[in-house]
């Protein structure tokens, strides 16, 4: 990697002798590289620039970088960047070094995706932290296997989602992605490469999972695999009553024997695009039918469910599905079904992404807000947020997700934070804005939602959290704050890693 070209003014935070190290040829201060590494999906934080970008070809390059910083009297900070899907600069490092993890893909000696079997673990995949989930899916399907827990969008790195939680409509059944990891290799803030699991170096293992990159960079993860289905029955049902909608969702996630594999839900409003970028589901004739219904209701709710099947269960799947929907209170005549391949369903967002890219509508600011709302407060949340704040805005800006899950599939020893109630709702405001002015309006709306929840005590938790004060972070972590601090002192005592999260450097 050449350091020549448009050079950024040199930052004193990284001593010149760094460029005499073996990895100096993989380090760039080219201004184009700097700008590119400073971008993320959110496009909200724009001016946090690193001093340099590392393009590692092997794990030792990252170890050398962190060890060099750790040995300095005034260390520089380091942020690992996967696919850049952060919303608010979480993978940035002001005057530090950004590690472009996808550069590890260029060396076949790195982990990649390797499928194995052990008698106590059964099938699993050893996966590089830089790997995209779509590539994990493709590689494991060659063996008729697949991971069991997913995110809605598959073009995210394994290390990135495991640093947060990794959630989608499968969480109620299989847990988040962090609950489906046997073991990891992690580079700590001291530059030590450590193998960790529930039984070995467990403090690091539990800390890193959902740890927002604060304790280490995930280099390898051993991911749970199961037999992959070949096809799915994909169903959407419409409701005009939020109480009936949530009651049916909660019922569906309570069925454990021969139940569903995925349950989500979303809001539908008169002005919103029925086939949004998350998936094009409804046919033109069905769209016309739904538009007519929406003209009579300012807001409606769409329950989305999926059941997997293969050749062995193809003869019984329709009957099973029929039993599952019996007694549900959706609007008569407003159930819609699709039968698609397993891959087509899991990769449903990609098609919408490509369409938006062609229209120039993907590479825009995304002031997203993701929340966990306790079940006991979801009706109040609906009345105050969905039926008031959102409808008052009266402008569709992207999908709004709402679906329940259960905490029983989460491990409280991990860093991830969820509400205390057994059932809680995942709510996602997945906004896209046309420019800076609209982005500010949407961000103000997010603040209004958060202020309301705080004022009336709805006990929500942010997912992919962002706070501006230490007090807010302490409140977010609650009883886990003490152990979170302890782990930081143990594994990254000089606060080198992931400064963009703004937890320990406020």
Image: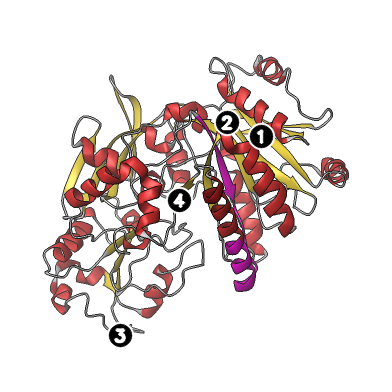
Q: Secondary structure at mark 4?
A: loop
Using the image, determine if residue 44 lies above or below residue 101. Answer: below
Q: Where is the C terminus found, in terms of image quarters?
A: bottom left
- What mark, if any, has residue 9 been given in the picture? 3
Q: Residues within 10 Å of mark 2 (few under 14, many from 20)?
A: many
Q: Is residue 268 magenta?
A: no
Judging by the rendered image, the residue that carries numbered circle 2 is 262
Apparent side of residue 458 relative to residue 198 in the rendered image (left or right) = right
Q: Locate residue 310: give its quadrant.
A: top right
Start-end of magenta stretch: 423-444
Using the image, determine if residue 351 lies above or below residue 331. Answer: below
Give the image location of residue 182, x and y in percent: 30, 32
- Label 1 with label 3: CB-CB less than 8 Å: no
Q: Secondary structure at mark 1?
A: strand
Give the image location of residue 269, x and y in percent: 76, 49
Q: Is residue 436 magenta?
A: yes
- What mark, if any, has residue 342 been given in the picture? none
Q: Residues within 10 Å of mark 4 (few under 14, many from 20)?
A: many
Judging by the rendered image, the residue that carries numbered circle 4 is 464
Q: Nearer the viewer, mark 4 or mark 3?
A: 4
For marks 1 and 3 on the same chain, the one whose residue lies earlier in the sequence: 3
CA–CA distance between discs 1 and 4? 23 Å
CA–CA distance between discs 1 and 3? 52 Å
The answer to whether residue 52 is visible is yes
Image point (26%, 39%), residue name = 205
Q: Locate residue 448: give its quadrant.
A: bottom right
For marks 1 and 2 on the same chain, the one whose residue lies earlier in the sequence: 2
Q: Nearer the viewer, mark 2 or mark 4?
A: 4
């Amino acid at each position: 990697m050449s350091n020549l070209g448009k050079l950024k003014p040199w930052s004193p935070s990284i001593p010149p002798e760094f460029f005499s190290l073996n990895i100096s040829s993989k380090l760039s201060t080219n201004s184009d590289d700097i700008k590119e590494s400073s971008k993320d999906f959110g496009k909200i934080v724009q001016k946090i620039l690193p001093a340099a970008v590392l393009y590692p070809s092997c794990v030792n390059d990252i170890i050398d970088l962190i060890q060099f910083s750790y040995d300095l009297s005034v260390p520089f900070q380091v942020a690992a960047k996967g696919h850049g899907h952060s919303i608010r600069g979480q993978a940035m490092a002001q005057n530090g070094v950004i590690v472009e993890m996808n550069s590890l893909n260029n060396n076949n000696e790195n982990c990649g995706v390797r499928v194995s079997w052990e008698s106590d673990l059964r099938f699993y995949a050893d996966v590089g932290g830089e790997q995209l989930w779509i590539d994990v899916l493709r590689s494991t399907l060659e063996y008729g296997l697949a991971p069991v827990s997913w995110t809605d969008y598959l073009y995210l790195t394994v290390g990135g989602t495991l640093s947060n939680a990794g959630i989608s409509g499968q969480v109620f059944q299989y847990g988040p992605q962090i609950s489906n990891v046997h073991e990891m290799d992690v580079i700590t803030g001291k530059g030590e490469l450590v193998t960790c699991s529930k039984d070995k170096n467990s403090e690091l293992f539990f800390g890193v999972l959902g740890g927002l990159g604060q304790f280490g960079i995930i280099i390898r993860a051993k991911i749970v695999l199961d037999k992959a289905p070949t096809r799915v029955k994909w169903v959407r049902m419409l409701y005009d009553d939020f109480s009936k909608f949530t009651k049916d969702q909660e019922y569906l996630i309570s069925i454990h024997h021969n139940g569903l594999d995925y349950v989500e839900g979303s809001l539908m409003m008169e002005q919103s695009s029925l086939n949004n970028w998350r998936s094009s589901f409804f046919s033109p004739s069905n769209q016309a039918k739904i538009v007519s219904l929406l003209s009579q209701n300012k807001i409606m709710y769409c329950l989305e469910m999926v059941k997997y099947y293969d050749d062995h269960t193809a003869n019984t799947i329709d009957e099973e599905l029929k039993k599952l929907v019996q007694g549900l209170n959706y609007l008569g005549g407003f159930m819609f079904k699709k039968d698609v391949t397993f891959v087509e369903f899991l990769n449903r967002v990609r098609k919408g992404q490509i369409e938006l890219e062609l229209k120039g509508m993907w590479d825009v600011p995304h002031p997203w807000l993701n929340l966990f709302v306790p079940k006991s407060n979801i009706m109040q949340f609906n009345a105050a947020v969905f039926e008031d704040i959102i409808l008052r805005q009266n402008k569709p800006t992207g999908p709004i997700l709402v679906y329940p899950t259960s905490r029983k599939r989460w491990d409280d020893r991990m860093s991830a934070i969820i509400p205390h109630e057994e059932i809680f709702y995942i709510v996602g405001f997945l906004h896209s804005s046309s420019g800076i002015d609209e982005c500010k309006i949407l961000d103000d709306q997010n603040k209004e939602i958060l202020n309301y929840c705080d004022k009336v005590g709805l006990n929500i938790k942010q997912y992919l959290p962002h706070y501006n004060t230490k007090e807010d972070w302490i409140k977010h972590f609650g009883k886990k704050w003490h152990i979170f601090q302890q782990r930081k002192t143990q594994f990254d005592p000089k606060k080198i890693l992931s400064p963009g999260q703004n937890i320990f450097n406020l």
